[in-house]
Amino acid sequence: MSGAEPRARQPARRVSGPARAALVALALTAPAAVQAAEAPEVAQACLSCHGEALAEGAPPIAGHSSNYIQLQLVFFRSGRRKNEIMQGVAEGLSDNDIRALGKYFASLPVPDVKPPADTQADLTRAGEAAAARHRCAACHGDAYLGIQAAPRVARLPEAYLAKALTDYRANTRPSSGGAAMTEVAGSLSDDDIKALAHYLAVLP
Ligand code: HEC
Ligand code: HEC
């Protein structure tokens, strides 16, 4: 058709409700002309903590599976996964928002994080031994990059990893995959958690 209007980019904030959700879905499924998928408007609020610079306590979320991200947001929203900040964030998200956020962050590349220099080789060895004992790699993969429901855990921030394991052990965080992590973490000692968090954080 000649004289067709250029496909104007509607600012998403002028469109509301189902139309907006449809636009977001379109943006996500259209073949990307540029490398990164366009962020749904609702993702802007996440970047201050989960962007290139991480806020204290916040893990990177780019490159996790869409299912994993959506599940965690649903857990936060229902209060089954406890964290004041994220429960507050998730409270305001609709199911459509959660789907769009899952797709968007899953479409981003896994951050290319250089592991911090390992100054505690003994702790690393203890972590490696604990990981072998508890067969962590059987679910998370030999390089800990994640398989299916089990997410990537390699090179996440050490304090975040320790907190995650402590939360599973205390049952303040639910686990998908047939309660896989609740079961595994139940038998971890404080020393195991410290060593495992260190080992995974400094994986080359
Ligand atoms: C003010 C900072 C802040 C903002 C804004 C924020 N988050 Fe978070 N987020 C956190 C923190 C802190 C955690 C770790 C919670 C914990 O320890 O359980 C977290 C955890 C998560 C997790 C779990 C990650 C994992 O590996 O299990 C997901 C998914 C997530 N946030 C998604 C989002 C999304 C999507 C948004 C925007 C809608 C958002 N967050 C906005 C701070 C923030
Ligand atoms: C039987 C399979 C299985 C085993 C064994 C297992 N995991 Fe997991 N792990 C999972 C699944 C599934 C999840 C996602 C659970 C959820 O929905 O929160 C997970 C989540 C995690 C998380 C949370 C990551 C994040 O971003 O918040 C950490 C950390 C973790 N596992 C570490 C370990 C360690 C360390 C071991 C060994 C001690 C281990 N896992 C053994 C299946 C497993």
Image: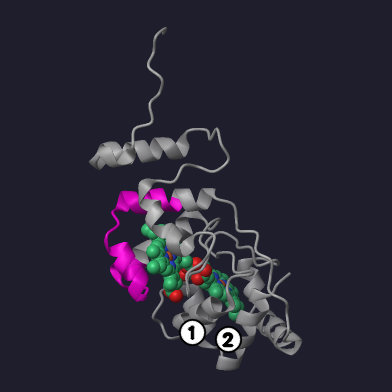
Residue to which mark 2 is pinned? 193
Residue neighbourhood size for the residue with mark 1, other residues' Cα within 10 Å, grouped as few (<14), some (14–19), many (≥20): many
Could you say which is closer to the camera, residue 5 or residue 125? Answer: 5
In this view, the residue in front, 159 or 51, is: 51
Asked whether, in this view, residue 26 is left or right of residue 180, the answer is left
Mark 2 closeness class: few <14, some 14–19, many ≥20 residues within 10 Å = many
Bounds of the magenta segment: 76-102
Q: Main secondary structure of the magenta part?
A: helix
Is residue 88 on the magenta stretch? yes
Q: Is residue 202 above or below residue 133?
A: above
The answer to whether residue 45 is magenta is: no
Residue underneath mark 1 = 166
Please indicate whether residue 184 sits to the left or right of residue 69 in the image.
Answer: right
The answer to whether residue 177 is seen in the rendering is: no
* Secondary structure of the residue carrying numbered label 2: helix
Q: Quadrant of ligand 2?
A: bottom right
Seen in the picture, residue 68 relative to 101 is either above or below; the reply is: below
Q: Is residue 63 left or right of residue 47?
A: right
Work out whether residue 87 can be spotted.
Answer: yes
Quarter of the image where the N terminus is located: top left
Q: Residue 162, how many percent across, how many down?
A: 54, 82
The total of numbered circles placed on residues is 2
Label 1 CB-ligand 1 distance < 8 A:
no
Contact between labelled residues 1 and 2, with CB atoms less than 8 Å apart? yes
Judge by depth and name the residue closer to the eye, 113 or 93. Answer: 113
| Position above or below: 8 against 111 | above
Q: Residue at x 52, y 76 (%)?
A: 160
Q: Position of residue 149 (x, y in %)?
A: 52, 62
Residue type, label 1 = Thr
